[in-house]
Image: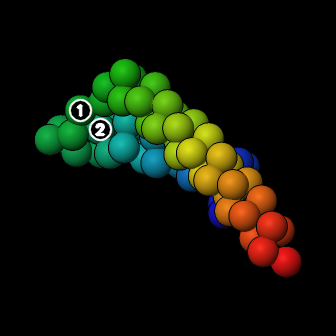
């Protein structure tokens, strides 16, 4: 599982790339700050899902031992 710092730093990197760098370098791209919110919401959902799933897998593995 990825650590929360890895998940959210990659989210920040891609938000910066797609919502600041690319729109300022080429007019075919547009910046939409609602997308940034959605990127981080998706990252939060991903982290919560995998945190929950990995804890269930750990519990199931410990029962087998």
User: Which residue lies most toward the top here?
Assistant: 34
Answer with the quarter of the image where residue 56 lies: bottom right
Dot 2 crowding, Cα within 10 Å, few <14, some 14–19, many 20+: some
Question: Is disc 1 in contact with disc 2, using a CB cutoff of under 8 Å?
Answer: yes
User: Which residue lies most toward the front here?
Assistant: 64
Q: CA distance from mark 1 to mark 2?
A: 5 Å
Q: Residue at 73% x, 54% y: name it.
A: 55
Q: Is residue 23 left or right of residue 4?
A: left
Image quadrant containing the C terminus: bottom right
Residue 43, percent from left and from top: 53, 41
Q: Is residue 11 left or right of residue 19?
A: right
Residue 58, percent from left and from top: 76, 63
Q: Residue at 67% x, 49% y: name it.
A: 51
The residue nearer to you, when weighing 33 against 2, is 2
Q: How many marks?
A: 2
> Can residue 7 be seen by looking at this rendering?
no
Q: Residue at 39% x, 23% y: name it.
A: 33
User: Which residue lies most toward the left here?
Assistant: 28
Image quadrant containing the N terminus: bottom right
> Can residue 27 be seen by looking at this rendering?
yes
Residue hosting label 2: 23
The residue nearer to you, when weighing 36 against 38, is 38
Residue 59, percent from left and from top: 77, 59
Mark 2: secondary structure: helix
Above or below, 59 relative to 32:
below
First-in-chain label (1 vs 2): 2
Q: Which mark is residue 30?
A: 1
Answer with the quarter of the image where residue 34 lies: top left
Above or below, 7 relative to 62:
above
């Amino acid at each position: 599982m990825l650590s929360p710092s890895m998940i959210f730093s990659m989210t920040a990197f891609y938000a910066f790339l797609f919502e600041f760098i690319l729109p300022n370098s080429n007019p075919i791209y547009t910046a939409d700050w609602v997308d940034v919110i959605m990127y981080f919401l998706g990252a939060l959902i991903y982290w919560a899902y995998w945190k929950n799933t990995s804890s269930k897998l750990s519990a199931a593995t410990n029962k087998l031992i």
